[in-house]
Image (cartoon, coloured by chain):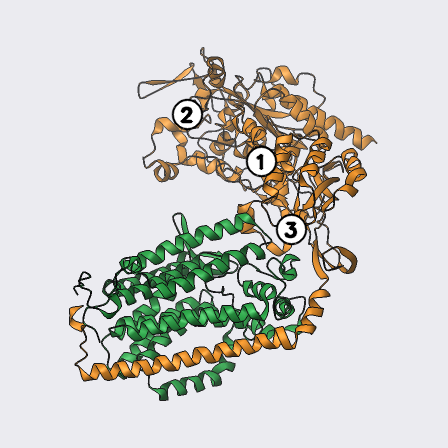
Chain colours: A green, B orange
Amino acid sequence: MKINISQPQHVYRTNKGLLQILHIDGWLLLGILILLATSVAIVYSASGGDEAVTIRQLIRIAFAFALMLVFAQIPPHIIYMFTPWLFLIGILMLLGVLLFGEVGKGAQRWLDIGPVKFQPSELMKLVLPITVAWLFAHSRFPPSMRRLIVGASLIGFTASLIVVQPDLGTSLLIAMSGLFVLFFAGLPWKIILASITATVLSAPVAWHFMHGYQKQRVMTFLNPESDPLGSGYHIIQSKIAIGSGGLDGKGFMGSTQAHLDFLPESTTDFIFSVFSEEFGLMGVLLLLTLYSLVIARGLYIASQAQDNFTRLMAASLTMTLFVYIFVNIGMVSGLLPVVGLPLPLISYGGSSLVTLMISFGILMSIHTHKKLLTD
Amino acid sequence: MTEHLEFNSDSETFQKKRQFRFRLYIALLFVLLLFSFLVSRMVQLQWIEYDRYQGLAEGNRISIETLSPTRGKIYDRNHHLLADNQPVYTLQFIREKMDNIGSMQKTVIKILNDVSPEKIHNFFTEFKLKNRSKSYTLPFSLSEEQAAQFSVVSHKYPGATLTARLKRTYPYGSTGVHALGYVGRINAKDLSKLDEKAYRGTDIIGKSGIERFYESTLHGTPGIQQIETNARGRVLRNLETLPAKAGQDIQLTLDIELQEFAESLLENKRGGIVAIDPRNGEILAFVSMPTFDPNLFVDGIDQSSYNRLLNNPDRPLINRVINGQYPPGSTIKPFVALGAIENDFITPTKKIYDPGYLLYKKHRYRDWKRSGHGWMDMNDAIEQSCDTYFYKLSLDMGIDAIHDAMAPFGFGQKTGVDIHGESSGILPSQAWKMANKGKPWYRGETIIASIGQGYNLATPLQLAKATAILANRGQIITPHLLRSSHPENLQQIEIKNIKNWEKVILGMKNVMHGSRGTARRYAAKLPFKMAGKTGTAQVYSLNSGSYDADSIREKLRDHSLFIGFAPVDNPKIAVAIIVENVGSGSETAAPLAVRLISKYLETQLQNTEK
């Protein structure tokens, strides 16, 4: 594939500014920057004005931002070329975790490679949807049954490697990102409806195979008041934080729930509760609008993508982002069980931020590396 | 990638794209639907039920605090307190509630006149950057007097609170530190291993010795207290308390008075002493010299004091009793002799002529006595520590027979003492050399191995254990420091001829009481009979980091060793002593052992008379 940038024939490239040269999508960038600025402010508040924590978050943001820029420069066909290898490496690392992984808080999720310690499952959040998109790059619409079965097995195999770590939450989310590709590749509606029905019916069977702490989480979710000082404590305190924020919130640095230590994990998984306590319903509506715009832009990029591979990749990465936002907010507001997932772009912490920013880099790359033949 | 360029002229591709876009719309719809679901949830919580949650947040006054358990105390065998918990005072600060940090800092510097102002300044500099609403503890404790001074002015400083807590103290200071160990602040490495729940509210953990080995017994279980606070977090009253369960007290087998006496014997020297009650394996004295003060470590030792200990050429931090591996020298001769008569390599009465050396493959292996001992039987050879006798005997036995004779006494294996990190020493054999050096065994090496040189290495504790087993006539004990009432089920080294025990022990008795015994000078007036064996370990390698000429010469000098037990017929104490770099065993170690054993037996006698 040859790209001749110097010819301003493409409809999006009539005007070659700095953003085009850097392969950056301006709208996406704007949304991300506002969200990251919110992150710094709310991490500062949730940590009780801890400057060291805030500076660490800034450094992580700078690092992740740089990674986004790097990935925006890589043309999608290069990613396509390396996809099978990335998948192979990802699977080997997951096996590595099972064999040599470090046990943290009862589950083997971390792999120690020299100075770096990271979770291969975090990498898989990107690699699995890309791999499934690769698989369906030349498929018909709707795809053949054989291809669908191969795709579903890839997803099932990857998810099962993470389930045994054990990390049910992450494995479900990763499976979801792969299933989105199947959906966009044209999975027949009959099959979609049938599997939803089957999932609902098999819930009691899944219950039987869950670990104790997973059952506990589900039980707490269904009735948090049953154990107000034990595992239901988090949800109750989080709901109090959100609810007491009211319409206009208690103001920046005004979260009593976080500052008096009632709220657990206030800078990470439960940061949304601090946000809603301080900025109220107005703030929440603004934040959700901002997220919706970023998602809409991602779906728009998918709609403008030129080939099947980039199309599927863009759509599924965007939908994965949506799922993370929905699950985190649903969890802290008591709609979903607690799974231990950070709020995208806002929570304190590095590894999920890195994955997200890479996926934004890929989205930008898809949108800015176009063939000159227009549609 | 050229192969899947897609042209819009292709109608199937166009169809495909349309269908894909349709699915994108569905997805967008799905997103908006679920987001409005979230919005309605937020409306419910923040608008409709606002009053309820606002009330709950206002009344959110119940917080849970951890009560840390009191650490178990440690006593010696005579109920002397070795590790205690003393109240000390500390200061906690919450930045949010303080109005003048600068004047607070000045006051603290003035009251804590025993801490350098710089360190206090550093604490406050860091404190100003930390979480505003959390409490931070000044890492220096206040004496009772300083605490009183502070409480007089405390009303001027909101946000600072004075609390009393218990601090681990070791009343005997450095005495017995290598057995007792010490506690220190929990660090990242400890954190990865321990159960977080059990250590809530605790910031110390056993770092070495008994404090570490019996950590789970001493630690206890934390309790929980529900506290009602006002909206700003001030404590109003306690609601429900689940009290902490204190750690268990433990009693050691150590006799702290004997320990003090034994340490005084090695004053200004380097070395180790172990005294064991051979009847049950109870360790009476556990000396590694020089020592250090464990109290330094409790609140975290400062860098310069730690460096001083670490770089001290006498290496006080090393536990010589379990980690000092020394060539055992002639102290192994009784064990070799027993193996030889047991397996019929020689009879006790058979005599061997010693001209002062053994010639083997054109090499002269010299006896310590240049002029030679003349005709020696086994008894004479042990009594006078004749090297040539054992050189010749070892050539008949071979290294593996020597290994097999000594292994049951615990040489080359960990003793199983209740302290972590014990070294296992080396008991060489053909298989050992092949596995560890990758070379076959040479017979010349057997000759030096027979007098405890060459590859042989043993810790003072291993020597004491072996001596106790010999004193027991083969009953195997495991040396230990925890006093327990359960009698152990002791195993026995089976030998063909029970009388052989007495033959070897007679040789050792003659070391002390015979007319030519190597230690006869020191045992002349003893009111009891004892058995012993002297030893001298050659030091041929220089491996310390010191370059001082005098000290190099000193560090090349031989180690002096002694093992022994008493009374011979009814042993109550077995000892092993190693004194580093002082010369021959009969000059330094032997008289120390005699004094230690006499002291112990005299006290025992007095106690029974009472």
Instruction: Tell me the amino acid under the disc marked 3.
Output: Lys
- Mark 3 or 2, nearer chain start: 3
Quarter occupied by residue A331:
bottom right
Q: Marks 3 and 2, how far apart in space?
A: 67 Å
According to the image, label 1 marks what residue?
B465
| Total number of numbered discs in the rendering | 3
Q: Residues within 10 Å of mark 3 (few under 14, many from 20)?
A: some
Label 1: element kind: helix
The numbered disc on residue B448 is 2
Chain where mark 1 sits: B
Quarter occupied by residue B17:
bottom left
Q: Residue at x 40, y 67 (%)?
A: A161
Q: Residue at x 61, y 26 (%)?
A: B531
Q: Is residue B472 left or right of residue A6?
A: right
Instruction: Tell me the amino acid under the disc marked 2.
Output: Ile
Label 2: element kind: helix
Q: Residues within 10 Å of mark 2 (few under 14, many from 20)?
A: some
According to the image, label 3 marks what residue?
B134
